[in-house]
Amino acid sequence: MSSENSADNAILNILHLTDCHLTKSEDGELLGMNTRDSLEAVLDEVNKQHANPDYVLATGDLAQDASSDAYEYFKSKTSRFACPVSWFPGNHDDRDVMRKVIGSGSELNKVVRVGAWQFILLDSMVSGKVHGFLESSELKTLEAALKERPDLHTFVCLHHHPIDIDSAWLDNIGLHNRDEFLKIIDRFDNVKAILWGHIHQQIDGSRNNVNLYATPSTCIQFLPKSDDFAIDTIAPGYRWLKLYPDGAIETNVVRTTDFEFKLDLDSNGY
């Protein structure tokens, strides 16, 4: 399914949230951090600095326990935005439960077109596994959307990282059929960026003139370039993107400034 809006000459302000790891319980924690509190702290920061996005992207692992209560909480918190919000699952999510909570809403649309841009939202979740894989149906969605509107600048979004990030444990659980995915990306020069979550850290890079963006989690962060599981002590955050009609992109990552938290630094997994 897709949705489409006009205003071809508009500058689009995009809010990216990811890896909230919410639970059914109000007291739910991930490695010592209350994930509802951390999401609220991130949204408070959004309200201070970027209160009026044109579109909100949430790229998976919204829940830690895949409970309907967790998704209902996320839905209630993002309802503060007077703009479309898109979701898709990560490895901790349950796509069927997400669908039930969303109901007849448009949050799960796979192609969203706004002005001079389109967003292609791919489901890389593999049930019962931590790594990602794009089924043939997802790859066909990607290719079809790119073929259909070569005139639109394109953001391709998924949960799992499609490149190695010099972190052995995370690279083992990235997108396992990345070569198939990137082969399609390389055929279309209207792809301006790939955006993902999963790795709980910031990346700003490029590959073959395509921008590559990973966004911090709204809760705990993983230590970059670590061979084994390790937590970083840096604060939760979000990414803000400004997309121009000519295809230019401005982006920055913002972290919470007054959110106090304690972490279980001795943990060897989550």
Image: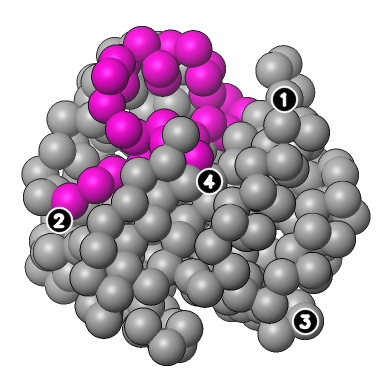
Badge 1 amino acid: Val
| Circle 4 residue | 121
Does dot 4 land on a helix, a strand or a loop?
Answer: strand
Q: Earlier in the sequence, mark 1 or mark 2?
A: 2
Q: Residues within 10 Å of mark 4 (few under 14, many from 20)?
A: many
Q: What residue appears at the point 74 percent right and 64 percent down from the top-left corner? A: 185
Badge 2 amino acid: Asp
Q: What residue appears at the point 14 percent right and 38 percent down from the top-left corner? A: 79
| Circle 1 residue | 126
Does dot 3 land on a helix, a strand or a loop?
Answer: loop
Q: Is residue 254 above or below residue 43?
A: below
Q: Is residue 87 magenta?
A: yes
Question: Which of the two discs, 1 and 3, sits closer to the camera?
Answer: 3
Q: CA distance from mark 2 to mark 4?
A: 26 Å
| Circle 3 residue | 208
Does dot 2 land on a helix, a strand or a loop?
Answer: helix
Front-most of residues 252 and 106: 106
Q: Residues within 10 Å of mark 2 (few under 14, many from 20)?
A: some
Q: Label for residue 82?
A: none
Determine if residue 223 is in view. no
Q: Is residue 167 above or below residue 134?
A: below
Q: Label for residue 44?
A: 2
Q: Which residues are magenta?
A: 83-110
Determine if residue 50 is in view. yes
Answer with left or right where residue 53 lies relative to residue 62.
left
Q: What residue appears at the point 23 percent right and 78 percent down from the top-left corner? A: 10
Q: CA distance from mark 3 to mark 2?
A: 36 Å
Q: Quadrant of residue 187?
A: bottom right
Badge 3 amino acid: Asn
Front-most of residues 237 and 260: 237
Residue 102 lies, in percent from the top left, at 30, 21
